[in-house]
Image (cartoon, helix red, strand yellow):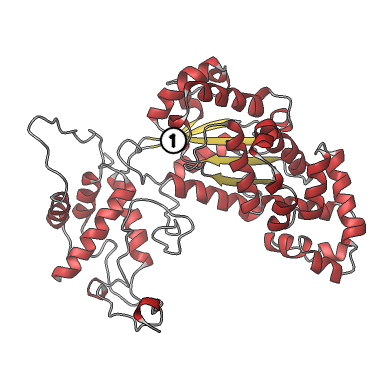
Amino acid sequence: MTDILRIPNVISVPAENRYALIGLRQNPFPNEPSIRLGNQDPRLNGSIYNQLLHEGQRKQFDSFLIPTVDKPDVRTLIFLMDHATRRGRGIGKTVFLKKQVDRIMSDFGESASRGYAVMFGVHVVPSASPPTTKFWQFARIIFDSFLETDIIAIAIARLRALSTKIRPELLAEIKTTEDLIEKLGNDHWLNEKRVPVDFELNPAVEQILRSSGVRDELARALANYGTSQEKFRQAFYDSFTNYRWRQDGGKIVFHDLVNLFLAAKFNRALLLIDEVEKIVPVQNLLERRAFVDSLRYFMFDGQCASANNRFFGMLLTIHPGLQELLLPHWNAAGLDRLAPINEPDAQRNTIYFPPLNARDAKPLVTEYLDYYRLPGAKFTELMPFDEDAIVEALVQSSGVPGKMLTLLSGVVDRAVELGITKINKQFVHQTYFQEAKAEPPVTENATPTSNPQTDLTGA
């Protein structure tokens, strides 16, 4: 094999652990202030998480969106207001939303609703390329999320269980969500158990779907191919042109699929829409108005299953800049009465993510440190940092958690290079301003932007 054709040497001998000096397996902090949910690195994919950090926001989330026996009436549309976007990404909203979906999907909302609801949730991130400017594109991204997270496959598997065509002793084997997909959603497994899939089971499911209000073409595709994402795409989804999505996309997602979910005995679903800044700023005025009009129709008062049953609870992640862009169109569409976006009325249905303070910064940093401690290492809670070092990193990062963790990543690397085992405020300060030297200097006539006057100490 010549050098030009060589492949990565993934079986190389591990290098000596340079972080053992400070009792760590490796640098515990991410080197960039953003979350990549599909990444394998726990520092980047949200695996390291202190659930107490946003406990207040979690309680608000449940109160706004999750029905219970004593509070069955919940909100249809709420906001997560991200105050950090104007300072940089990394406030923690994406990980928060992911954790709420994981919590709901672990038992279909049984613990969160205290047994009242059978529900699911999806975390939806709009596309930036091509941009999501039309409501039908928004609906298609939601449909994609249902497919990619196996929500549709789970719903069809539940319909198979409700069809009376599968023997009770086989249903007794279904203990987990994985069983729903791998057994009830597996034609091979069912055929081995002598369940006539093609001649009895699928026709029964199709009949349930039709009688529930799912239109014929989609009902047939769901019944026969809905448990396989690949087969369903080939049989139905891939044949949908942009023209058909423009004409019918909203109704498919907010009417037909809702009827599917209701037939499968779900009575609530959450659409957690992240990064709405990928939608609103790139819309022209007509697109923005049409978008909010469609949002009102399909979520509140249109002739569709979603609005009629208040089936979806939607969360939109926004920030003050988007609030200003949306406000005139929101009011013109009458949404100010249904889900006010203007202050102070918006406070009634908004979860706020404030800047991090020193009280919460310490347990967050400890979470990352503990994840990468060497077995048997003797350490204090924040070792190798002292408390003032963490506060200094927080202040220099304007209270944005992601930026603070990234700064600490650079601090740890520099400390290891210099052989320093105790990191104090002065060392963090020096490291921060050493990295800042690489930025272009401010010209004489430029007016530097001052840091926000925010109390980060938790006082």
User: Which residue is at 86% across, 47% downward?
Assistant: 206
- In this rendering, the answer to whether 419 lies above or below 64 is below
Q: At label 1, which amino acid type do we have?
A: Glu
Residue placed farthest to the right in the image?
Answer: 199
User: Which residue is at 69% across, 31% downward?
Assistant: 247
Q: According to the image, label 1 marks what residue?
A: 277
Quadrant containing the C terminus is top left
Quadrant containing the N terminus is bottom left
| Residue 378 left/right relative to 75 | left
The secondary element bearing badge 1 is classed as: helix
- In this rendering, the answer to whether 291 lies above or below 16 is above
Q: Who is closer to the viewer here, 225 or 361?
A: 225
User: Which residue is at 30% across, 54% downward?
Assistant: 405
Q: Hey, which quadrant is residue 207 in on the image?
A: top right
- In this rendering, the answer to whether 382 lies above or below 321 is below
Question: Residue 307, image x and y in percent?
Answer: 69, 28
Q: Is residue 70 visible?
A: no
Question: Residue 367, image x and y in percent?
Answer: 37, 59
